[in-house]
Image: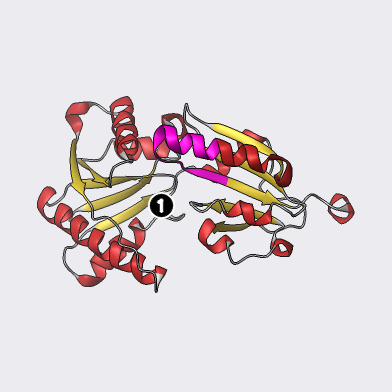
Amino acid sequence: MRKIYLIGIGPGNSDYLTLQAIDTMKKVDVFFILEKEKGFKEFLKIRKEILEKYLDRETYRVVNAKIPKRKKNRKSYKEEVKTWREQKAEVITELIENKMKDGEIGAFLIWGDPSLYDGHLEILQHILKEGAVNFEYKVIPGITSIQILAARHKIPLNRIGESIVITTGRKLKEYTPDRITNTVVLLDNYSTFKDFKDSDIDIYWGGYLGSKDEILLSGRLKDIIEDLKKIRREAKREKSWLMDTYILRRPEGPESNE
């Protein structure tokens, strides 16, 4: 029986791998690295650097595979993602079937944590449901950019009596300012924080968290928004991509301090 591991590797810094992740990597026969469109070469490089840092090169092999570009579906975002994942499932099925021997262990190195805004877990479940190829699988959790963000800004993720909302820039568009208390935002290609610039809200922002290019900014949103927009523009222009995470947080009132 073949076995697949989804290994969370954190936000890119090899120091953030857990001991469980490293121990699991040492068992793996073949690592599958999926290549996206241009602009993601750095993600591939970081994965290979992690392997070289922790493993003996002669104990494993690496198989690269191209995955299709996601095609926009203006009518349904869910259908767009569903179709794309099914296409990825076909690629992964072929890898497991043709690039692994029976009894071997394969792995995908997942940015952050496999359970948070990553589709590989659902893709593996889809493949098994379709019955195209048989395998066992296990998830190894990883440190997320959310944890790194809170650590860098030296803030707790929760304050007394508050819940935490974790969402995306696309979903944040549906929020009104009065719904923001303590909101973590990922995958915001739209700079949706701009919609709250006139509200009494603080922002704790981080780009390329955990990497040598890490950028941090915090303060009252309406006071620093122009600086933040400039930083994001310059970062995208320099690297052609930007992965950022931020927290929108309403300042504590008297009740929160009791």
- Res 12 → quadrant: top left
Question: Secondary structure under badge 1?
Answer: loop
Q: Main secondary structure of the magenta part?
A: helix
In the image, taking residue 179 as reference, residue 27 lies left or right, namely left
> Which residue appears farthest toward the bottom when viewing the image?
75
On the image, the x and y values in percent for residue 124 come to: 29, 61
Between 156 and 171, the residue placed more toward the observer is 171
On the image, the x and y values in percent for residue 141 come to: 44, 47
Q: In this picture, is 74 found above or below 43?
A: below
Between 152 and 15, the residue placed more toward the observer is 152
On the image, the x and y values in percent for residue 163 come to: 69, 59
x 51%, y 39%: residue: 233
Quadrant of image for the N terminus: bottom left
In the image, taking residue 4 as reference, residue 251 lies left or right, namely right
Label tally = 1
Q: Is residue 208 visible?
A: no
Q: Which residue is mark 1?
A: 114
Magenta highlight on residue 18: no
> Crowding at label 1, few (<14), some or many (≥20) Cα neighbours within 10 Å?
many
Q: In this picture, is 84 found above or below 5?
A: below
- What amino acid does circle 1 point to? Pro
Between 249 and 200, the residue placed more toward the observer is 200
Q: In this picture, is 65 found above or below 148?
A: below
In the image, taking residue 78 as reference, residue 105 lies left or right, namely left
x 81%, y 50%: residue: 252
Between 196 and 255, the residue placed more toward the observer is 196
Magenta highlight on residue 239: yes
Q: Is residue 196 visible?
A: yes
On the image, the x and y values in percent for residue 152 come to: 61, 34
Range of residues picked out in magenta: 231-245
x 66%, y 47%: residue: 157
